[in-house]
Amino acid sequence: MTHDTATHDLPAYPLPRRCPFDPPAEYTERRDDHPLLRVRLPDGTPAWLVTRAADARAVLADPAMSADATRPGFPAAFPAVAVLASLPTKPFFLRTDPPGHDEQRRKVIPEFTVRRVRAMRPAIQRIVDERIDAMLAGGAPTDLVRALALPVPSLVICRLLGVPYEDHEFFEERARVPLATGSGPAEIRQAFDDLRVYLGDLVARKETDPDDGLISGLVTRHLADGAMTREDVITTSMMLLLAGHGTTAQMIALSTVALLENPDQLAALRADPGLLPGAVEELLRYLNIADRVPARVALRDTEVGGVRVREGEGVVIPLGVADRDPAAFTAPDTFDVRRADRHHLAFGYGIHQCLGQNLARLELEVVLGTLFERVPGLRLAVPADELPFLPPVGLHGLHELPVTW
Ligand code: HEM
């Protein structure tokens, strides 16, 4: 395969989804001939796009593929990637390589084990019940994003980290900036700066007034003995606060739409609530709301799917494209809550695989199970093709979700 010098003829990346559930056909329909597709990033530079599931796993597991966004050639698929990489402060460990990545990740792993997360079920159920009580009391129609999808993960991550929920509008607003159409680098930088100052103050408060939250734990266990710097604690807290609420919120919103738009699947789920854990896995595969996040840059010449990737070339791994690969899933474009195959890539793969996946799964199970049980008449309040979907600059999802019952 030749290497392009001109990029104007290449398909753009990222492209918006034409159907809110399906990855762009421009990428999936060329999978047979192109294990790697040459694409054009918003800044005009080329990158490789991985179209097959097996290659996506291989790239994500390959130590020669760096997640360090400050390296030349790292694909800036949307403005927040470049802004985060340009900040003078330490990067999120999501965008770093070993050994630094592993050291920072190890400090927070204990908070996210299956056992620790399972213990949060009663608290999460209480949060969901209270939000649904409030939503029903407020009357229909309502915006499900504001009423439920966003507050639940925000409340949960606040509780886990020890962030006061009364500050939720402040951090939710800042988290929205990088995902909004037209946010320029200066606005995005300001949003990250605001969050850093806020979390810096919070960390200082935990030093004199500790609690049982994760941030306080990092302060007392690791800041005190020098294993983490103040900046490490702030950076890790910021990444968890950001990654911990917007992702799950968009999964709740888009899952609700997918189930309402597939009434046979919703009926199957209602008839047999035992299908719920499998349905959550299928929703994660089918919707893949964070599939634009994984990107890497080659540290040395390497081969992917028989194609040579040269040192310094960028690779994007849209997981939604991989999770529709017929070599990995039977009838991959069908949404089937009874699907037995659960080896999807929606949480990534390899050393950067999602740290919060157990928590996200539990929140999704509790929210979706409770919502469709307690609000049996739930339906969209506007036609599905009028729903305001987010622009292709970060996560897939919705600005708002008008529903009635
Ligand atoms: C349904 C919701 C979620 C989805 C679909 C999702 C998806 C992902 C994906 C695809 C990655 C890998 C990125 C890469 O390889 O470049 C990732 C990493 C990560 N996620 Fe999630 N995520 C979700 C929820 C959460 C939650 C609730 C938290 C925290 C409480 C969280 C924290 C993280 C962290 C810290 C990483 C970086 C891990 C590392 O680099 O070692 N995520 N997530």
Image (cartoon, grey):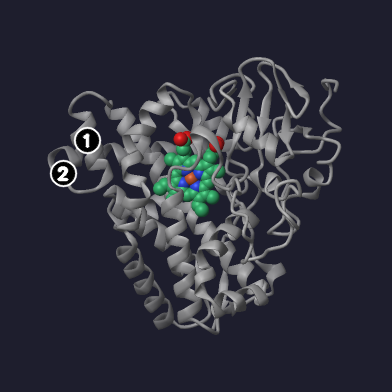
User: Mark 2 near ligand 1 (CB under 8 Å)?
Assistant: no
The location of residue 335, given as percent across then percent down, is: 68, 63
As drawn, 102 above or below 199: above
Q: Mark 2 is on which residue type?
A: Pro
Q: Is mark 1 within 8 Å of ligand 1?
A: no
Left/right placement of residue 127 relative to residue 339 reads left
Q: Residues within 10 Å of mark 2 (few under 14, many from 20)?
A: some
Do the residues under discs 1 and 2 have CB atoms within 8 angstroms? Answer: yes
Q: Is residue 153 above or below residue 301?
A: below
Q: Which residue is mark 1?
A: 219
SS type, badge 2:
loop
Vertical placement of residue 203 versus 142, above or below? above
- On-image quarter of the C terminus: bottom right
Residue at point 30%, 64% (across, down): 123
Furthest residue toward left = 208
Amino acid marked by disc 1: Val
Which residue occupies 67% across, 72% down?
Answer: 261
The image shows residue 195 at horizontal and vertical percentages of 38, 41
Write down the residue under mark 2.
Answer: 210
Please tell me whether mark 1 sits on a helix, a strand or a loop. helix
Alpha-carbon span between mark 1 and mark 2: 8 Å
